[in-house]
Image: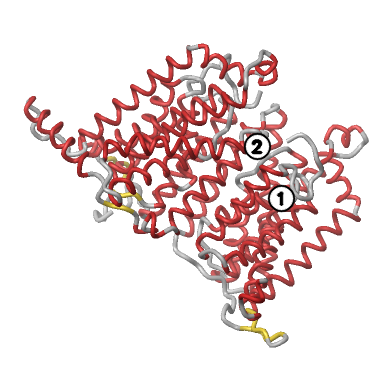
Amino acid sequence: MSDPLSAFHLAVSFSAFTDIDFWTSVGILAGTYAIFATGLQMNVGFTGIFNFGQVGFMAIGAYSMAILTAEHGVNFWLSLPISILIAIGFGLIIGLPSLRLRADYFAIATIAAAEAIRLVALNARDLTNGPQGIFGFDNSWNSVSDSIEEFIVDLGWTDVPSLFPLFLVTWVVAIVLIVGFSRIQRTPWGRVLRAIREDEDAARALGKNAFSYKLQSLAFAATTGALAGFVLALNLKFVVPDEFQPLVTFIGYVVLLLGGLANYWGVVVGSVILWTVLEGMRFVELPLSETKIAALRFMILGVVLIGLMAFRPQGAFGKREEMVLGD
Amino acid sequence: MLLMLHDLQSVSQRGINGLSLGAIYALGAVGLTLVYGILKLVNFAHGEFLTFGAYMAYLVNVTWGVPLIFGILFAIATTALLGVALEKLMWAPMRGRGAGMLQLVLMTIGLSFLLRYGIQFVWGTELRQLDVNVTDTVNFLDLRIGRTQLIVVVVGFVTLVATGLMLRMTLLGKRMRALSDDLELAEASGIDTSRVILWTWIFAAGLAGLAGVFAGAVTQLQPELGFELLLPIFAAVILGGIGNPFGALAAGVLLGIVIEWSTFFVTPGLKLAVGFVILIIVLIIRPEGILGRARTV
């Protein structure tokens, strides 16, 4: 905005399109949301339960890892599985009472549970350090990151971005998860989930404990939520309550719906499109202030969500035969 | 028990805070529950109606420098208009296409983004204050009570009682409740349902606009004002029995008082979490709501 001419002309700075550091960050963001939304896809696309509290699991994962590592000296790599187990524990605590409810009540109960988690993180200063958040949990990761960086430099790419190792790890995790979840979905267990989505009573009549399957589906979502939380924490290098607003879950739904329901690869498509567009907008120099541009990004997100639901409820690339919201 | 532990002054001051918060919740909840009952629409954009109302009052009261009473009337009118416009543009066409409930829920979330960040686009994120005296107090039976708070409580409760009477006594109120019970049956018995639906939006959005002005008057305006109130308003709706306007009125007031008094036991930052925990407990033990009728949930 410092250039007086650009304040009056719509200009696109093409040089920035080749800024590798910038696109590495965007890639990490897209990967984080792909991981985040993979669990949502199992819940919404394959089980038909409307988990609106996914960000709560992300918060639990990130905070558990940070607290165990930075405050209690637990080994970083050991803290990851423990944190996943804690997130699954919360998934069960939230799911046990609320999964018996009708879909709309479940949605409200889960968003309330996620907000309760964020408010506790904001106020339980002894545990979470309140709004200042937690730092210094990433030493072990940093040394691994440095080794990956050195390895890449040895391969001949000398100006590798410092976040590139995290980018690689994020996408390895995302792809492993998606391949794994797609396989799980083809097992008899996965087919029961789809049966529950199509007709819960019929699944019950066949002797399937629908409640238990839904609870397991929620536990899978808690797992991917926690994993996304780890990546977010390593990317930011701190964990603060403000990163876990309900907005995050809703962005997860936009990712899910853009890519299409009932298709795990859809979350990759959705996340890459969404973040490329949202972050790419930074290069369109609008004669507007920082806050206005931030607001505009979310207004576009809102319009995309309204438009998708009005005209393509199966998602931009979803198959209508497989799943349409609202049947 | 509260009186034994704390002095009368702070119990009653927080009681008044609770009543004003409760009035705001109740005004928000009654519209949300009517819209749910009649249209089966879980409206996540209802919070933004409050925010919109607050900024409309700000426009009149601060930008144009007109007394707040006109700001309040303007806020109610414009928010009601917004409700009607959205019904015509979005909800009626979507109902015509037979859209499912969760498809509509996600649309309301999109709409909530559009409205909230539209407000942020125009007014920015800075905290804004309506032209009200927030420090002036009134002495009442040796108790000092914030004047703005008192006005909110009085006007809020008059409006709540009037709303209750409207629903109970007038033909329109009876029709609204009939639609809420069974839309097809109401239509079959000759009620012009689309007109009643329009009036429901006028009431729901207008009352939300008023609640937003109140919330702005006792705190400050910012684009998340209404969204932050939405979950406790949902809690009041569910506590009162979803679709039951009288339940929502009572539960809103009750929830406001409980949340404010909970600050005697927990840090103020956690008072909303107390509300959510109450919501989740009620969902577990009595999902039809404290005042709701038992039915499948």
Is residue A31 depicted above or below A181 in this figure? below
Q: What is the secondary structure assignment of the residue under circle 1?
A: helix
* Residue topped by disc 2: A104
Residue at x 55%, y 58% (from the top left corner):
B225
Is residue A326 depicted above or below B200 in this figure? above
Q: Return the residue nearer the eye: A54 or A219.
A: A219
Q: Amino acid at mark 1?
A: Leu
Is residue A167 depicted above or below B212 in this figure? above
Q: Amino acid at mark 2?
A: Asp
* Residue topped by disc 1: B239
Residue at x 36%, y 55% (from the top left corner):
A289
Image quarter hosting the C terminus of chain A: top right
Residue B15 in the image: x percent, y percent?
67, 71
Query: Given this view, does label 2 or label 1 mark the residue nearer the observer?
Result: 1
Residue at x 42%, y 32% (from the top left corner):
A223
Q: Is residue A299 visible?
A: yes
Give left or right: position of A142 versus B30. Answer: left
Q: How is the image coloured?
A: secondary structure
User: Is the residue under label 1 in contact with that under label 2 (CB below 8 Å)?
Assistant: no
For mark 1, does the 10 Å Cα neighbourhood hold few (<14), some (14 to 19), or many (20 or more) residues?
Answer: many
How far apart are labels 2 and 1 at the CA level? 14 Å
Residue A259 in the image: x percent, y percent?
45, 25
- Residue A126, by quadrant, is bottom left
